[in-house]
Image (spheres, rainbow, N blue to C red):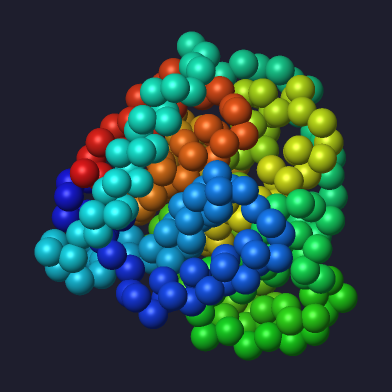
């Protein structure tokens, strides 16, 4: 990735304003700390960057220096994260250790708003949405569309047909987080981590299945234009929650970040 890559180009201002309004309302409601607000900005940037692959927004002159600054900041944080020579094989991970999937009963942004986490992320990441009530959310996304940041594939979401083609991915996988330190956390912290919008993004189902619980040393998005954003978010989530990183993943993330500025 070079400076001209789509990953570090400015998104449309209209979509940026929409996402900023979303976090402004939810952040004010939850009383987030400055550090948590800052991390969520990275989630917003990730969610709105749909310019992937060989396409992208605008021209090279539209490279957003703020995103470059985020890459530099993430690289600085990466240098301070403890590193394991390789990912530990604890062999005791269980999804239930992170609580019920997509629970609304969490302390992160979006928690306690009456909608489950999956619907919160769909509402944040999809465009041209038609909403309606379901048992887990009074304003659930019934239809919408987006371009998966992992593959560049354009997808149409319909709750009543093929909904699994759009999935919500943990950028830092839960199983990886467990191996890298989450095994020692209290349940409340693991619940927040599993439902933190800063660690979540809507993607195509095939990419999510292909990634599974792989760390950056073994898997990066097929759309190379998204690597900069992916690395920013992976690093900032890991730093904020106090996780370690394996040596190979650190190399991959550092390279992706350096190529972003």
Comparing 30 with 89, the one in front is: 30
Quadrant assignment, res 88: top right
Q: Tell me what residue is drawn at x 76 percent, y 60 percent.
A: 111
Q: Position of residue 110 (x, y in %)?
A: 70, 63
Quadrant assignment, res 165: bottom right
* 241 over 50 or under it: above or below: above
**Residue that extends furthest to the top in the rendered view of this protein:** 85
Comparing 110 with 164, the one in front is: 110
Q: Is residue 217 left or right of residue 157?
A: left
Q: Position of residue 149 (x, y in %)?
A: 43, 59
**Residue that extends furthest to the right in the rendered view of this protein:** 135
Q: Position of residue 202 (x, y in %)?
A: 56, 61
* 18 over 108 or under it: above or below: below
Marker count (numbered): 0
Q: Is residue 169 left or right of residue 182?
A: left
Q: Position of residue 215 (x, y in %)?
A: 51, 33
Q: Tell me what residue is drawn at x 49 percent, y 69 percent.
A: 20
**Residue that extends furthest to the left in the rendered view of this protein:** 61
Q: Tell me what residue is drawn at x 18 percent, y 65 percent.
A: 62
Asked if one can make out residue 255 in the rendered structure from this viewpoint, the answer is yes
Comparing 202 with 38, the one in front is: 38
The quarter in which the C terminus is drawn is top left
The quarter in which the N terminus is drawn is top left
């Amino acid at each position: 990735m070079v400076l001209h890559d789509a990953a570090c180009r400015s998104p449309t201002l209209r979509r940026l304003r929409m996402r900023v309004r979303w976090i402004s309302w939810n952040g004010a409601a939850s009383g987030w700390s400055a550090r948590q607000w800052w991390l969520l900005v990275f989630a917003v940037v990730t969610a709105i960057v749909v310019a992937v692959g060989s396409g992208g927004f605008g021209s090279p002159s539209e490279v957003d220096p703020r995103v470059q600054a985020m890459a530099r900041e993430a690289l600085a944080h990466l240098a301070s994260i403890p590193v394991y020579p390789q990912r530990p094989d604890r062999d005791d991970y269980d999804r239930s250790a992170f609580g019920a999937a997509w629970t609304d009963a969490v302390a992160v942004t979006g928690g306690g708003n009456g909608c489950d986490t999956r619907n919160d992320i769909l509402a944040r990441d999809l465009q041209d949405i038609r909403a309606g009530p379901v048992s887990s959310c009074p304003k659930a996304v019934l239809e919408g569309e987006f371009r998966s940041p992992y593959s560049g594939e354009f997808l149409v979401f319909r709750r009543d047909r093929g909904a699994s083609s759009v999935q919500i991915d943990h950028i830092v996988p839960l199983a990886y987080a467990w191996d890298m330190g989450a095994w020692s956390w209290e349940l409340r912290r693991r619940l927040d981590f599993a439902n933190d919008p800063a660690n979540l993004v809507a993607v195509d189902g095939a990419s999510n299945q292909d990634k599974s619980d792989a760390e950056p040393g073994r898997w990066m998005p097929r759309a190379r234009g998204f690597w900069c954003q992916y690395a920013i978010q992976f690093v900032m989530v890991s730093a904020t929650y106090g996780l370690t990183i394996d040596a190979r993943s650190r190399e991959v993330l550092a390279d992706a970040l350096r190529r972003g500025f």
